[in-house]
Image (cartoon, rainbow, N blue to C red):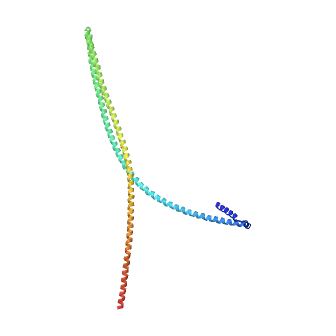
Amino acid sequence: MAVGTCFIGILLLQCFLLFTPAQAQDFKPEKFDKSLLNDSLQEQEILREEMVLEQEILREEMEQIRIEMQRIMEEIKVAMKAEALKLKAELQGLQQETKSIQEEILGIMEKSKNDFLAGKEEMRKELKKMRMEAKTMTKEIKQVLQSQKAIWQQETTALKDSLVEARGEMNSAKADSKEVLQSSRAAFSDFQKEKSITMADSRTESGAAMFEAGSIFKKSQQDYKQASKNIAEELKADMQETRRAMKRRTRTQRRDSKNVQGEVLAALKIAKNKRVAELRHDSTRKKLRKKKKCPVHTKANQEKRTDQKNRETSSCCAQVQV
């Protein structure tokens, strides 16, 4: 509508510029308005028809675009399905490989677990043996201490008896000399010294035995802890190594699959080109054979025709002779 009004305004200006004063006297506004309205209506009708045609063209183009898009989407869908099937097959192969690798890892872990349990059982047996040895050593130490105690008790009883006898002798012989008293005192002091020395020796021996048993037990505990730690570290290292091996295998398998796909595609292209070349060669051969056969057929037909003519002439001659 705006375009129509602008066009009408431009026409009015042109008309006003073209009109002369003489023409202005003959000018009739009613006729001019009717002609302008008719022209504008015709132009609007033309514009409407053009718009309708453009809309129809656009609809057809949109329909073609929609059909082309549907075709492209169908092709993409088919390609995606084929790619999905390929990926599914590859995933199934990878899943089978991962299952086999997992089974191998489980076997290795089971073996390492059994080895660890066997080593643990051996360590338990050794610890049990060491405990038994420690118990036997403590029993022996106790027996030694008890024997030392019994000896000491026997010696003390003997000393008591000797003291009682000495006291009896002292009571019976109070009038003896001082030398006898001194000798008895010296003997008693010697006895006490021997007693203290024997007790100290027995205590030092028992303490040394107990200390040695404790150190052996601690050393066995430390050895067991170190062995268990080493076994755990070895298991951890084996697990890490298996994981790395799995990663390397997956990488090599992917690389090999890509290489195999490239080789297969190259082989298919080569086979396709070879087949196309063979078909072209066969077609050219057939064409050449057809070309070669055509003149032969014409010659044979000509010979047949000449034979027929000769026969006809000979038959006619024979009839004439008859």
Left or right of 103 in this view: 187: left
Left or right of 82 in this view: 203: left
Give the quarter of the image for residue 38: bottom right
Give the quarter of the image for residue 155: top left
Residue 183 or residue 267, whichever sits in front: 267
Give the quarter of the image for residue 39: bottom right
Left or right of 227 in this view: 70: right
Q: Is residue 99 above or below residue 277?
A: above
Residue 30, percent from left and from top: 72, 66
Residue 315, percent from left and from top: 36, 87
Residue sitting at the far right: 25
Q: Does residue 164 show up?
A: no
Residue 238, percent from left and from top: 35, 43
Residue sitting at the far bottom: 322
Residue 259 or residue 166, whichever sits in front: 259
Residue lying at 34% horizontally and 45% vertically, measured from the top left: 108
Residue lying at 32% horizontally and 28% vertically, measured from the top left: 211
Residue 74, percent from left and from top: 48, 59
The quarter of the rendered structure image containing the N terminus is bottom right
The quarter of the rendered structure image containing the C terminus is bottom left
Q: How many marks?
A: 0
Residue lying at 52% horizontally and 62% vertically, measured from the top left: 64
Q: Does residue 144 show up?
A: yes
Residue 118 or residue 236, whichever sits in front: 236
Residue 107 or residue 247, whichever sits in front: 247
